[in-house]
Image: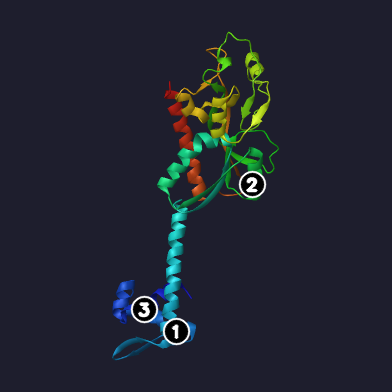
Amino acid sequence: MEIRNLRHVVALANRMNYMQAGEDLGLSQSALTRSIQATERKVGLRLFDRDRSGVRLTPQGRLFVERAQTLIAGMDDLDKTMEQTASAEQGEVSFGIEPLPARALLHGVLSTSLTRSPRLKTRVLIRSIEALWEMLVSGDIEFFISAQKRLPWNPPPKVTRLGTFPLSLLVRSGHPALDKRQAPAAYPVLLAGDAGQFEYLPASLRTLVSGPRHIVEDYGLLGRLTEDSDAILIASTYAVAQEINEGRIRELLPTEDYEPADIQIAMYSLERRSLSPGALKLRSDFQQQMLSLTRGYAKTP
């Protein structure tokens, strides 16, 4: 039985008049009559009594109409839900992100999503790239955002580059290493994850970060530890932009012409899986937030 036949029965039950019900449906009286008769033959029951006094529902017709109205309402709700899901206004998206891009990008992206699509649910997991990869392969998340790394990917992922973050050495204001008259010394190192062997650093800076490493996957805490100790934070200036602007954290530069290393930030997904409309919209939001961040930071003195 098709949903249109149910609509025809309900329309006639509302009007109890073939001509008026046909006008509501955009059907001729004869076409509506044929539809009602076909439905009655299908269910093997008489739904309406017809005589010179008019049209009346039979007892079984009243039961039919009650159930039909429920089915029609459910179908209409399904149509609306699918339409909103297709436009990323509704649904649910689970994704992951490493601590560094989470600190720099996540607030802006989620603020945009909450304003534009308040009914779109998001589930965000902040983990290391290794943990995020396992969740992506298992289907727990649709995509993740992280620094690009060369790992033995299997299956090969789809990688969408978002942009670059500068990777710098960051210290509290008044840190001894800011005084270039002092001899280099080894200081504790703060990280949100593994940052390699620092081959990109000049020899003088490699000495400074030769102390013990402390890995904390929380940039809010990393920033406070940097302010409260002589530890050196290895991170992007994007992650502590507010602390830098307020003068509480400074970038450690060996020379005025020293250029910090850049790290590529990318979105990882699986080729064999299609992203949901909500995930595609969030990908666009991350791209826009990255663009906004780099432009805004370039203007910061």
Q: Which of the labelled discs sits on residue 135, or is there none?
A: 2
Q: CA distance from mark 2 to mark 3?
A: 54 Å
Q: Which of the labelled discs sits on residue 58, or is there none?
A: none
227 vs 76, left or right, is: right
Inspect the image, locate mark 1, and give the three-letter code of the amino acid beneath it: Glu
Q: Position of residue 130 (x, y in %)?
A: 66, 39
Say which residue appears at 44% left-offset and 64% top-offset: 77
Element at label 1: helix
Q: Which of the labelled discs sits on residue 40, or is there none?
A: 1
Estimate how packed mark 2 is, as few (under 14), some (14 to 19) or many (20 or more) residues with alpha carbons within 10 Å: some
Contact, mark 1 vs mark 2 (Cβ under 8 Å) = no
Say which residue appears at 40% left-offset and 74% top-offset: 7
**Residue lying farthest top?**
181
Image depth: mark 2 or mark 3 in front: 2
Element at label 2: helix
Residue 59 lies, with reference to residue 129, above or below; the image says below
Estimate how packed mark 3 is, as few (under 14), some (14 to 19) or many (20 or more) residues with alpha carbons within 10 Å: many
- 266 or 211, which lies in front? 211
Q: CA distance from mark 1 to mark 3?
A: 12 Å
